[in-house]
Amino acid sequence: MSLVKKPTTGMKDIMPEEMRIRDYCIRQIEETYSTFGFSHIETPCVEHIENLCSKQGGENEKLIFKVLKRGEKLNLAEAKEENDLVDSGLRYDLTVPLARFYSNNSANLPQPFKALQMGNVWRADRPQKGRFRQFMQCDIDILGEASNLAEIELVLATTTLLSKLGFENFRVKMNERRILKAMAVYAGFPEDQMDIVFIILDKMDKIGFDGVKEDLINNGFEEAVVNKYMALFDEMNKADDALMYLKEALKDSIEDGVIDNLKEIFSTVEAAKVANCEIAFDPTLVRGMGYYTGTIFEIEMAELNCSVAGGGRYDKMIGKFTGNDTPACGFSIGFERIITILLDRGFKVPGETEKYAFLVEKGMDAARMGEIIKEAAELRNTGKVVLIAKMNKNKKFQKETLKNEGYTEFKDFYVEGLKN
């Protein structure tokens, strides 16, 4: 069996130039989110299979990389189904592990708890630009805060970060799962089939208004119900204030205060945001995760025809571990998509440390080599980066390669003396 040089499908090697940008972004994430009071934590990349398959992860549960049992526990002869062979899997997101972490450690955490997580996750998905099977996620979550202060802080922190990374004119879309449900109830859709309605609605940006209407009818829903449902979107488009229109139209179908709560989030974020971005109500925003219970949000950018961040409130997840529901809300940026945009822009890390390359001719005697190393140490003590390397025969190509790595100052040391 011959060895394979290329990475596994959907995964990639990361070159130094990209790694510098990734490291810079990670530093910006940690610095920005820490100013909002988020604490950095870490959870294992391998999670119990029961947790990953708890019907809270939507379609992602079909994309789990499962881990076989080990040693004597792996009994192939007696296995009757897949579950007899696996007991864990690679995490497909950071939210389910966070819920387990909080359930296990809440007694030793401040209340409410503001968590920052960064780490790789794995999904057996179809790879495409900006989407991989192994990818970095960056999440901030607020656990134990029932008020809309959680949503406000999450949106402000995320938009502030994106602004610091040089992004502007992006769009923050928000909706409410309880509004989605109330609209479906108002139209007359059966409650046990609402997930089908939402899956179709989620395709609005791809198939348009007429496509959604046709798809709903083709799925067996009564035309009168579909027409009543789609009329809500028509009227919202005409209204000066879509949320106020919905508040009146859905007054018999929605919980008191839901729409006022969302309006308060909009007005507060709009007043406090430092980023140059649009905050918009999007009644077609669904978010596929099964664990969302309230406010949901996404961020879209013109550079990629998809969202680059998303999240929402999930007040029921932690209760599945503890038996007691805990308010929870989170926002995740698509780290890989952000990196893809920055690479496409030709982004250069600002304020990089000055980098020297000392190229030393082969055959240099030990005493002179010691002097060169001492000179490098003196520069390093002043905060400079100094690389010492043997000089290649093709010195021009060697220097061009080093320039691509950010080296700007060169010193050539020959056996007979220093040459610039």
Image (tube, rainbow, N blue to C red):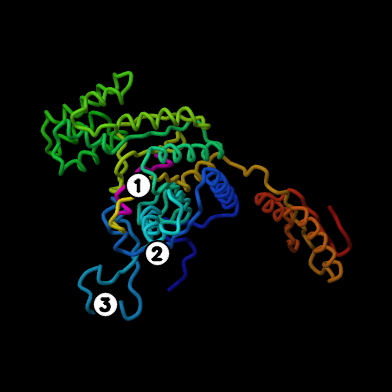
- Residue 109 placement (x, y as % from top left): 45, 56
Residues at marks 3 and 1 touching, judged by CB atoms closer than 8 Å: no
Q: Which of marks 2 and 1 is nearer the N terminus?
A: 2
The amino acid on which the numbered mark 1 sits, given as a three-letter code, is Pro
Residues at marks 2 and 1 touching, judged by CB atoms closer than 8 Å: no
Mark 1 secondary-structure assignment: loop
Mark 2 secondary-structure assignment: strand
Toward which corner of the image does residue 311 lie, by quadrant?
top left
Left or right: where does residue 68 sit relative to residue 344?
left
The residue lying at 58 percent from left, 51 percent from top is 23
- Residue 58 placement (x, y as % from top left): 28, 50
The residue lying at 50 percent from left, 51 percent from top is 39
Residue 327's disc is 1
Residue 76's disc is 3
**Which residue does the numbered mark 2 point to in the structure image?**
46
Q: Which of marks 3 and 1 is nearer the N terminus?
A: 3
Left or right: where does residue 354 sit relative to residue 217?
right
Residue 406 drawn above or below residue 240: below
The answer for how far apart the CA atoms under marks 3 and 1 are is 42 Å
Q: Is 313 within the magenta? A: yes
Q: Which of 44 and 150 is in front in this view?
A: 150
Q: Nearer the viewer, mark 2 or mark 1?
A: 1
- Span colored in magenta: 306-319
Q: Nearer the viewer, residue 391 or 179?
A: 179
The answer for how far apart the CA atoms under marks 2 and 3 are is 22 Å
